[in-house]
Image (cartoon, rainbow, N blue to C red):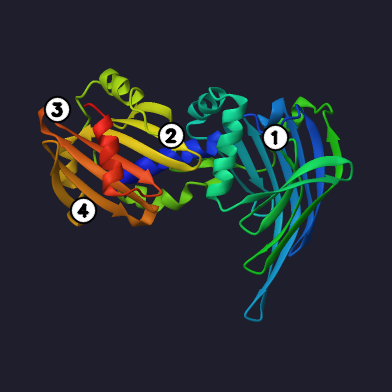
């Protein structure tokens, strides 16, 4: 379902960036970790401009044993991130990738428009939705840390920097402990030069994703990439005015865009998202997945509601034949038909 995949890509990009804005409360510095457990080795991190520039180098060996079969994986990587641009070098595979973080600007604007209290609430919502919890504060070698446990991993975090982690997932034990920490130390600008010694493949498109985060959608998008989308005639300025006036309780509108012949708006509450997308009704004939949706009438419009199982979401599609337009309202995680209809009632197209 191409259009819903596009919606999810936008949402994932925004979710990622919301967590990247001003990553650390310390302007610059250096930290070195000792890795133990299933993975043994070292990891080093340099940062500047509160984390908008980072360089991470890891040299490690991971040993796992499953069904009596032992597997060993070597890692020697260097990753540089400067705002929306990244480079990843794998010196064992003698390969590299580079690209840009999707929707970086929108993500920065999203967080920068929040007050400090709103940012804290946003972070707490994300933690809760991931099943995590705060376990209090502890002093770790002289540094006061928030102790957070999420998805089986326990972390000690000082001013946004993880100083220690421990946990076990699927039998793989993960332990990291800082052995050297230089907060607010000067870091040479050359530290953030792209890694040398490998040839980089450019993955700048949205479907390439940031360091593979969106790579799971590559194959499906490639299959449909030759399917032409018919551009919408509906005014983008009018669309923008309507969605900006729409108040979805607990959600914040983080971006309004026009792309690939469609108009879109993204609303977020922690990691929960609601996407509104308007496109030409001529594109609906191409969407075979609508056959599984429930069709009905609401407020004089033909509507279609269905679950989007692969994205753990749901979608409501409303037809506006007088404007040659259909409007899709998609929620991740899914909402009920009545909940999406209430959002539709607030959109005065």
Front residue of 253/161: it is 253
* Quadrant occupied by the C terminus: top left
Alpha carbon distance from label 1 to label 2: 31 Å
Along the polypeptide, which appears first: circle 1 or circle 2? 1
Q: Which residue is mark 3?
A: 323
Alpha carbon distance from label 4 to label 2: 26 Å
Which of label 4 and label 1 is nearer to you?
A: 4
Q: Which residue is mark 1?
A: 54
Q: Which residue is mark 2?
A: 251
Q: Which residue is mark 4?
A: 293
Image-quadrant location for residue 48: top right
Instruction: Sort mark 2 into few (<14), some (14-19) or many (20+) by Cα contacts within 10 Å.
Output: some
Front residue of 40/151: it is 151
The answer to whether residue 185 is above or below residue 273 is above
Instruction: Sort mark 4 into few (<14), some (14-19) or many (20+) by Cα contacts within 10 Å.
Output: some
Residue 298 location, x and y as percent?
15, 40
Which residue is at 42% across, 40% downward?
273
Which residue is at 31% across, 43% downward?
339
Along the polypeptide, which appears first: circle 4 or circle 1? 1
Q: Residue furthest bottom?
A: 68
Front residue of 60/274: it is 274
Badge 4 element: loop
Instruction: Sort mark 3 into few (<14), some (14-19) or many (20+) by Cα contacts within 10 Å.
Output: few
């Amino acid at each position: 379902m191409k259009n819903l995949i596009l919606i999810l890509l936008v949402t994932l990009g925004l979710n990622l960036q919301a967590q990247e804005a001003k990553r650390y409360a310390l302007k610059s510095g250096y930290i070195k970790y000792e890795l133990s457990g299933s993975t043994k080795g070292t990891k080093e991190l340099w940062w500047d401009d509160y984390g908008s520039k980072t360089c991470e180098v890891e040299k490690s060996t991971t040993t796992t044993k499953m069904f009596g079969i032992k597997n060993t994986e070597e890692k020697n990587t260097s990753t540089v991130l400067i705002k929306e641009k990244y480079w990843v070098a794998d010196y064992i595979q003698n390969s590299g990738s580079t690209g840009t973080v999707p929707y970086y600007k929108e993500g920065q604007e999203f967080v920068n428009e929040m007050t400090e209290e709103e940012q804290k609430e946003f972070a707490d919502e994300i933690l809760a939705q991931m099943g995590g919890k705060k376990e209090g504060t502890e002093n770790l070698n002289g540094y006061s840390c928030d102790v957070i446990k999420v998805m089986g991993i326990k972390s000690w975090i000082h001013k946004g920097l993880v100083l220690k982690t421990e946990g076990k997932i699927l039998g793989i034990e993960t332990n990291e402990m800082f052995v050297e920490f230089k907060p607010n130390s000067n870091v040479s600008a050359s530290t953030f030069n792209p890694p040398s010694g490998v040839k980089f493949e450019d993955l700048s498109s949205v479907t390439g994703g940031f360091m593979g985060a969106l790579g799971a959608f590559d194959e499906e998008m490639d299959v449909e990439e030759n399917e032409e989308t018919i551009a919408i005639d509906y005014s983008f300025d009018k669309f923008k005015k309507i969605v900006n006036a729409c108040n979805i309780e607990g959600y914040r509108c983080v971006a309004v865009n026009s792309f690939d012949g469609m108009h879109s708006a993204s609303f977020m509450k922690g990691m929960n998202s609601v996407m509104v997308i308007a496109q030409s009704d001529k594109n609906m004939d191409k969407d075979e997945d609508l056959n599984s949706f429930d069709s009905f009438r609401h407020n004089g419009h033909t509507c279609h509601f269905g679950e989007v199982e692969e994205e753990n979401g749901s979608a409501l599609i409303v037809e506006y034949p007088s404007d040659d337009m259909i409007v899709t309202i998609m929620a991740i995680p899914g909402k009920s038909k009545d909940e999406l209809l209430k959002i539709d009632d607030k959109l005065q197209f």
